[in-house]
Image (spheres, rainbow, N blue to C red):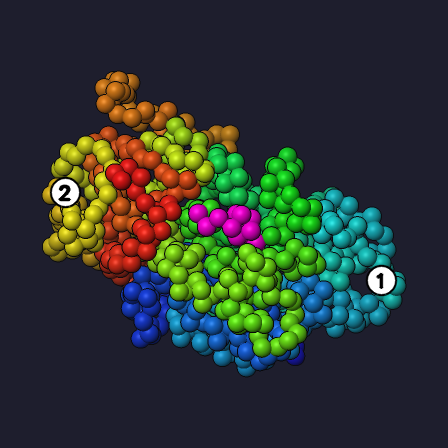
Amino acid sequence: MTAPNGLGNSIENLLSLSGEALTQQFLSSPPLNNSTDEFLDYSEHERSEMSVSNNLWYKEAIFYEVYVRAFCDIEGTGNGGISGITNKLDYLHTLGVDCIWLLPIYPSPLKDDGYDISDYCDIHPDYGTLNDFKILVKAVHERNMKIIADFIPNHCSDKHKWFQSARLSRDSPYRDYFVWSDSPQKYKDARIIFLDVEQSNWTWDETAGQYYWHRFYKEQPDLNFDNPKVQQEMLNIVDFWLNLGIDGFRVDAVPYLFEREGTSCENLPETHDFLKKMRRFIDNKYPGRIILAEACQMPDEVRKYFGDGDEFHMGFHFPVMPRIYMSIMRSKSECLRNIMEGTPEIPNTCQWVTFLRNHDELTLEMVTKDERKEMWDFYAPVPRMRINLGIRRRLAPLMGGDQRKIELAYSLLFTLPGSPIIYYGDEICMGDNIWLEDRHGVRTPMQWSDQPPNGGFSTSNKLYAPVIDDPEYGYQKVNVVESEKDPSSLYQVIRQMIQRRRKHLSFGHGSFQWVNSDNPHIASYMRICGIDRMFIVQNLSDQVQKVTLHTHAASITPFSTTSMPSSSNTTTGSLHRRTPSNSGDGIASGIGSRVGGGDGGNIESVTSSFGNTLTVDGAGGNLLGSKVTPIPTRKVHTHYQQSNTNINKQHHQPLTTKEEYEALKGTKPPLVSFLNVETASYDEQSHYLIDILTDYQVMVDQKGYVTMELEPYQFYWFSMGEITTLMGEGSKSRDLRRKSIQINDHTSLHQRNIHFADPIDE
Ligand code: GLC
């Protein structure tokens, strides 16, 4: 099947719309339909209101990466397929997934597992039919979820009819679809990406009588984007799939579209021009659909792929991924802090995408040579575990099967800026098979149950790859059924993390501020969006760690102009554990529930469980007609806007004066050396922090300090309040108050006593 023809004119028209018109169209496209299905402890209506009621849904979404072949085989062919995914949608929905990313689904000779496409507008026969695909898309949307597909514009398969024709003759209409040369000396400055397999980016084609250019396997000739016909073909393909209703694309290998002599042939201006053109086309014809850039580059380079909000909506944050592993390996937070400081501001309508693992090797391209060696030695001690510049292992084995460490890694993933992606199987601690070729060791069949012979994946006796059945990670022990049954399984913990995350806008929309401490083993930061303020504290080490932190931040109100809480109480700093005896009807009613009306500007009182009254000035009300900023102004990363070498010094001044320091000395635990959170007028107050995962509570002192002790790998996601308000856009503004958190199911986490237990008052 080929791409539909006759799109030329309409594409031209669409491309001519201005950026402003596009943005308006984008922001005003209709929200998702609600369905009546129930979702966990929220009704679908609430869920939709909370997470995807605005067209920036992708900024709050949890993504899930599915390798179609591995997920579920309901036909008994030995290969997973499209209808297998449809069959398992409720599983993903229950986990809390908002958007599914499908790895390549197209016909392909599978040299690169589908990244070598031989027909862009059809489904690989192993996976099913276009009709199966339409059924999947419909079923996804019925669950109020989204679906994006992999799109691979940079190259196709050498079996694609374009290449087959092109090589036959210099007169072929497709000859100029590819990049040819009589000499392999051209573009010498371009690196080789598949270093372990390819010696050159040029391969001699006997039939063609010329060399052709390829950045990946030689079976994947690069397309020639200097040819307008190639660009048009790509827009036609985008059109074809978006017309089938998908919500966007993960766009593969975007830095390499164009080649220019004397450059690295990466991130060229021409590449950005084409991508902007593609974006204009999508925004015009399919407003609200998204594109996600795969550009394995440092943040400054990836930043360019967001443009002025007119290129990609999303971009993978590749460098932060290995640093999550590095920080846990070293038990030190410094590398994480450094990479976050080197991460530039991005436009309001854009979002980073973070991940722990994916279908490729854990790439160490974005660390130094020494760091790579250090990480290889630690995480890949057996040579076979190494591949190219990375590691062919899955998350659970990388963490030595230690669930505390895995949960810590997820805590980092879910709380750092960006929308997280979960790689299929990692939510149930699936293992790997390093003896399989290429990157196939992390692409083994999903383990659904302990049923022999294939763990519920397939009834066939001939699978595309063997299911894992070793004693530690075998399907007999590691599978979905077991995970669902066990209240303390990783799956259940992730599910709860997702639920909690969903209630706090600051994770998807908020600013990020590192909070310094005197303890290098602690990674602590603030996420702030309006009055929703999350304070994250994580122990990266395998030892108990004590830390003193300052919690008062910041006048950053990306979504709200309402004033921030002030307090009339004067409680001294200490850590309290809420117990049933003092919690009455629980955190929700004890700390955060709103009393009284809700118009902007009203004074609201909330009664704490300690009998103190917090006065909240106009926060959380119906903001329609009040002091509303029509389009959210996102004042974030204030001190990261500058270049690395020019970080605004004022953020590194101590918050307390010398006198205050002296006065506090002796009565307080050791003070932090310096802090980078900003002071604000409401700074001098006491307030509560509530760990939203376990319901533990910290009372912060008047100066904003809190001291706590964390068990090995323990983490807290402290909330400073229960109500979050999302401002709408202008007249479409909607009051989206979060419901108070009802934590009914935390007992299981307490019982585990692994790392959620309160270490102070016990
Ligand atoms: C991307 C994919 C990888 C593939 C390569 C070439 O990096 O993630 O699997 O091999 O592109 O298409």
Residue 732 in percent (x, y) is at 29, 63
The reply, left or right, for residue 605 in relation to residue 144 is: left
Residue 344 in percent (x, y) is at 48, 42
Amino acid tagged 2 = Phe
Report whether residue 191 is seen: yes
Q: Total label count?
A: 2
> In the image, is residue 335 above or below residue 15?
above
396 inside magenta stretch: yes
Q: In the rendered image, which residue does mark 2 sit on?
A: 610
> In the image, is residue 461 above or below residue 292?
below
The reply, left or right, for residue 271 in relation to residue 518 is: right
Quarter of the picture containing the N terminus is bottom right
Query: Could you say whether the residue bearing mark 2 is in a helix, strand or loop?
Result: loop
Q: In the rendered image, which residue does mark 1 sit on?
A: 205
Viewer-side residue, 446 vs 21: 446
399 inside magenta stretch: yes
Q: Is the C-beta of the residue carrying label 1 under 8 Å from the nearest atom of ligand 1?
A: no
Nearer to us: label 2 or label 1: 2
Instruction: Give me the residue at 56% from left, 48% from top.
Output: 398
Instruction: Give me the residue at 58% from left, 80% from top.
Output: 75
Amino acid tagged 1 = Asp
> In the image, is residue 159 above or below residue 723?
below
Give the mark nearest the N terminus, 2 or 1: 1
Residue 379 in percent (x, y) is at 59, 44
Give residue 213's quadrant in the image.
Answer: bottom right
Query: Could you say whether the residue bearing mark 1 is in a helix, strand or loop?
Result: strand
Q: Which range of residues does the magenta coloring cover?
A: 394-404
Residue 49 in percent (x, y) is at 30, 64
Instruction: Give me the residue at 65% from left, 70% from top.
Output: 464
Quarter of the picture containing the C terminus is top left
